[in-house]
């Protein structure tokens, strides 16, 4: 069984979130949450909250039949959202553009065993 959760229009650059997402990709849910609780990156909190939301979605979807201890992070990926463009005044009447980037996060949890591909 798979459960998903999405966080859209999160106001942080995708390259900052991708570093934290790579830490928990493929981990069991319990150890992923424990790892994120002790990570000192700003993106760790929202990713932890998103994984907990996906866990709640899994129990709700299966009506309590899923075993939370067997769930693992099947996939977590970060996409770039829309960029807000702001301008800063500079010397001699010029202006500099400031890009405020946003991100979309997608998490899929599963309780099925990982299938290894043959090489």
Image (spheres, helix red, strand yellow):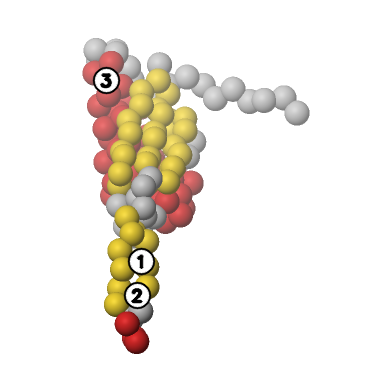
Q: Residues within 10 Å of mark 2 (few under 14, many from 20)?
A: few
User: Which numbered disc covers residue 98?
Assistant: 1
Quarter of the image for residue 109 reads: top left
Picture residue at 42% right of the left edge, 51% below the top: 14
Quarter of the image for residue 84 reads: bottom left
Please name whichever residue, 15 or 68, is drawn nearer the observer in this view of the structure. 15
Q: Which residue is mark 3?
A: 59
Residue 70, image x, y percentages: 40, 25
Q: Earlier in the sequence, mark 3 or mark 2?
A: 3
Whether residue 35 appears in this view of the structure is no
Find the distance from the CA under tag 3 to the CA under tag 2.
52 Å
Picture residue at 30% right of the left edge, 73% below the top: 88
* Secondary element at image label 1: strand
On screen, 65 above or below 22?
A: above
On screen, 41 above or below 113?
A: below
Q: Residues within 10 Å of mark 1 (few under 14, many from 20)?
A: few
Residue 116, image x, y percentages: 63, 25
Please name whichever residue, 106 or 8, is drawn nearer the observer in this view of the structure. 8
Q: Which residue is mark 2?
A: 95
Picture residue at 31% right of the left edge, 38% below the top: 7
Q: Earlier in the sequence, mark 3 or mark 1?
A: 3
- Of discs 2 and 1, which sits in the foreground? 2
């Amino acid at each position: 069984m798979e459960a998903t959760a999405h966080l859209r229009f999160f106001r942080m650059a995708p390259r900052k979130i991708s570093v934290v997402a790579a830490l928990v990709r493929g981990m069991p849910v319990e150890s992923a949450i424990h790892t994120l609780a002790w990570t000192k990156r700003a993106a760790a909190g929202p990713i932890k909250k998103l994984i907990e939301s996906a866990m709640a979605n899994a129990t709700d979807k299966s009506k309590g039949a899923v075993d939370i201890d067997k769930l693992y992070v099947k996939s977590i990926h970060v996409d770039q959202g829309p960029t807000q463009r702001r301008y800063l005044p500079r010397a001699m009447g010029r202006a500099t553009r400031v890009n405020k980037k946003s991100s979309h996060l997608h998490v899929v949890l599963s309780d099925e065993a990982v299938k290894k591909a043959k090489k």
